[in-house]
Image (cartoon, rainbow, N blue to C red):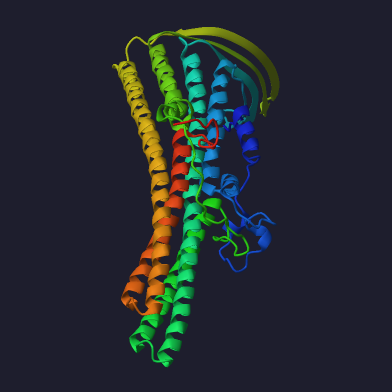
Amino acid sequence: MKALFVSGTTFVCIFLSGCMNYVKPPVAVTRDSYTQLQEKEKTLIPAGLKLLTLDEAQKIAIANNPDFKSIQFTIDAARARYYQGYSSYAPTLNAGMSISQTFSKMHSYSNGLKTRSQSESYRPTLSGQLLIFDCLAREMNLLASKYELAGTKATVNDAKRLLLRAVAYAYNDVLLAQTQKKIILAKIEYSRKMLQDSENKYNAGSVLLSDVLNFRITLDNGRLELVQAEYNIKVNKYILAGYLGLIDGTIPKAVQFPEVKMPQDKQILSVTMYIDQALANRPDLKAYRERLQAAKYSYWGTWSAFGPTVTGNYSLDYNRSRSITHGGGGSHSSSGTGAFGYGINAEWNLFNGFYDYYNVKAALASVAETDWALAQTWISVITDVRSAYENYLTSFQQAKMSKEICELTKKTRELVENEYNAGTALVTRLNEAERDLVEAQNNLASSIVNIENAKAQLDAAVYAPQTLSKDEAEK
């Protein structure tokens, strides 16, 4: 006997499995050779972009960063699970078909009769169920899925928050590396000028050969530092390009970056106001709040297992059969029958080895775990804001002091240079003055970049992109 069963649900799933569609990564990532890639297969800096600002870099990262694009699809999955919950309110309908054939052969030795018979049966069926009552289990699961969806959206926003901060840090590292290169170039130019002057004076017999060698050494040291500076620029551009999701893995040389400038003083709000903004806006905190609600509804859903379940069922089937006998006079018969049935079933599990009891306990523990995780996140948010706030204020203070020191060291070097040219200062003193100036210039550049990093840190802690440029007030 052979039987064939076809499920309508299975058929739909097989059909839809071939319709999967989403925005895919660049074709280049499927290749095993970089040199054979075509430009159109790459993700590159937008055409015509000459000056890359931080705002533009962050927009490119949001559009192309693979990690962020990947986590965005968790929203689609959570949304699908939420809408999937509504299916429990719909009736089910299953289609089936069975076909069977039977063959037999009989030989009677007493009268020598031989008979051969066959019978066939075709039976299509339709059946289904409708869940009428389940002690609100469906409602609790649906609400839990709703808050899980909201929590997933908040998690994606938190990934965006962290990506914006990471891009800002990498972008500022490029600015710092380029500024340090300019400082080294200025040092090389100064050493070259002093070397030329000392050589002229040495030929005139007014300075020692050691002075000439001293400036030649400082010039070579500057060139050595320039090699390292070039390397730092390239590496930091590679890191930034990775955040931007660029297939080439670097920023083109034609793309320029703005100069590092001392920002003007900003009058910011009190730290408590930023804390209030963070508690209202931070997506990681919102994610735990939503998941706490989801955990609570899941907990209440476990209690439904202690109640009864009422289900309606229905079926429609038709059976067509035929029988044929050959030999012994032969016979032929066929019949068809149809049937429709429905009913209501009620079930109430009274005992299952405390399975449902411990399921409730586990769900309650999940609620408590999420509740305390929310408390920890709440404290972390406040800590982040306070740390970022103090870092921003301190960075401004350090930048001001570094600027004053830089101006003093520049003036000092000029005085020492004049003294050296007049023969009243040794070359070692001039070396110290030059070294102090370069160090002060590097400290100033680092302090200015630290202000931008601190701003990015505070923006991320509060999750307000324009934290320090809107609603400014006296401290």
Label total for image: 0
Side of 74 where 306 appears, left or right: left
In front of the other: 272 or 25: 272
* Residue 220, quarter of picture: bottom left
Q: Horizontal and vertical percent for residue 305?
A: 39, 13
In front of the other: 456 or 344: 456
Q: Quadrant of the N terminus?
A: top right
Residue 175, placed above or below residue 340: below
Q: Residue at x 50, y 48 (%)?
A: 168
Q: Quadrant of the C terminus?
A: top left
Q: Horizontal and vertical percent for residue 314?
A: 59, 12
Q: Residue at x 54, y 22 (%)?
A: 85
In front of the other: 5 or 239: 239
- Would residue 5 be visible to someone looking at this image? no
Q: Horizontal and vertical percent for residue 147?
A: 49, 23
Residue 102, placed above or below residue 437: above
Q: Horizontal and vertical percent for residue 43?
A: 62, 55
Residue 248, placed above or below residue 99: below
- Would residue 283 be visible to someone looking at this image? yes
Residue 37, placed above or below residue 74: below
* Residue 414, quarter of picture: bottom left
In front of the other: 99 or 257: 257
Side of 391 where 132 appears, left or right: right
